[in-house]
Amino acid sequence: MKSKILIFLTLIGLSAIFYSCEKDGEMVKISSDPVPPALLTVPDLTLERTNANDTLVFEGSVVDPGFTASATYILQACPAGNNFQEVTQLYSGTTVEEIKIAVSDLNSILLEDFPADETSDVDLRIRAVLVVDAGTGAPGTGTDPMEYFSIVVSTTVTVYGLPRLDLIDSGIEQKIQSAKGDGVYTGMVQLEDASAFTLYDPDTETTYGGSNGTLVDDGAAIDPEASGWHTLTVNVNDLSYELSPYSVGVVGEFTGWGGDPDHAMDFDAEEGRWYITLDLPAGPMKFRLNSNWDVNWGPGGDTDLPANGGTLELPDSNGNIIITGAGNYTIHLKLNGSSGTVTFIKNS
């Protein structure tokens, strides 16, 4: 009797196993014609600070691989024509029918990879990732997930940068920015003494002029006293401004330590660095501000520059850089108050 019961129970167990395998097989059966996700609608991506609290909605459709499985959907962007070699991830989640993103959040994400206050051509797509099981190493598992991509949608995006004031009639397009968004703006500007300028706030559509450090709404254009690079700080809270010459030059034994004019460097606002290309003889040199010794930059002590160039720290104003290999150099100088870093690239 006991043996019959054991045989009966064994048959029931085997039936359950076969049934389970059959059901599992049905769950992972992949369609020969899977339907990828689709990006159906894309909102206007002209982002503006005044609309920072608005919510944008991207609409998509789900992936259908031929079996029931949950998916993670990733909304991706890249520069137009980049073929998603450089991907910016805008969203990741389990919902795709309505992908909601605040303007401020989307702007912060895009600002990392796209230029501010400019219109860029971009490609968008939805990537669907499916994991149906884990740990076996087979297709569809955690180590080899199934991926499906939507058709690429091309559009344009305009990303806004930090709050800014544009210099009008200064001779070139330039701006100063408010790093904290507190109404205090600062930056390096290049001016001509014959080109008076005003300041325009595109957010409030306010124009400022002024004189002698006082800012005036719709006031007369600000007249710089000298040509060249300046630091400009504007406080719209108390309507004041400070404009000071800021010219960095190369000086050394070969210039008579100031007997001849310093070799003036140019400023790259995007990179935040000073630069110049010139012939340097062997011997000592360093950098100074506004062609005088009140502020100057050199290494902590006399330091040899390797013959093929290199990078040096400039912790204070003591000491000289000793050029050991005469030649033509491109110099990149980044300053942070009384310190900085300089890189010499030897061209010949």
Image (cartoon, rainbow, N blue to C red):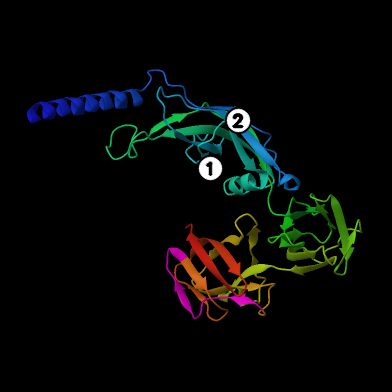
In the figure, is residue 311 to the left or right of 132? right
Q: Mark 2 packing: few (<14 Cα in 10 Å), some, or many (20+)? A: some
Q: Amino acid at mark 1?
A: Thr
Q: Quadrant of residue 4?
A: top left
Q: Residue at x 67, y 80 (%)?
A: 294
- Residue matched to label 1: 88
Specify the farthest residue to the front: 1
**Which of the pair 196/121 is nearer the observer?**
121
Is residue 304 in the magenta section?
A: yes
**Which of the pair 180/222 is nearer the observer?**
180
**Rendered-image quadrant of the N terminus:** top left
Looking at the picture, how far across and down is residue 115, in whole percent? 63, 46
Looking at the picture, how far across and down is residue 225, in whole percent? 83, 67
- Residue matched to label 2: 59
Q: Residue at x 42, y 68 (%)?
A: 306
**Which of the pair 43/156 is nearer the observer?**
43
The answer to whether residue 256 shows anywhere in this view is no
- As helix, strand or loop, the secondary structure at mark 2 comes to strand
What stretch of residues is rendered in magenta?
A: 295-310
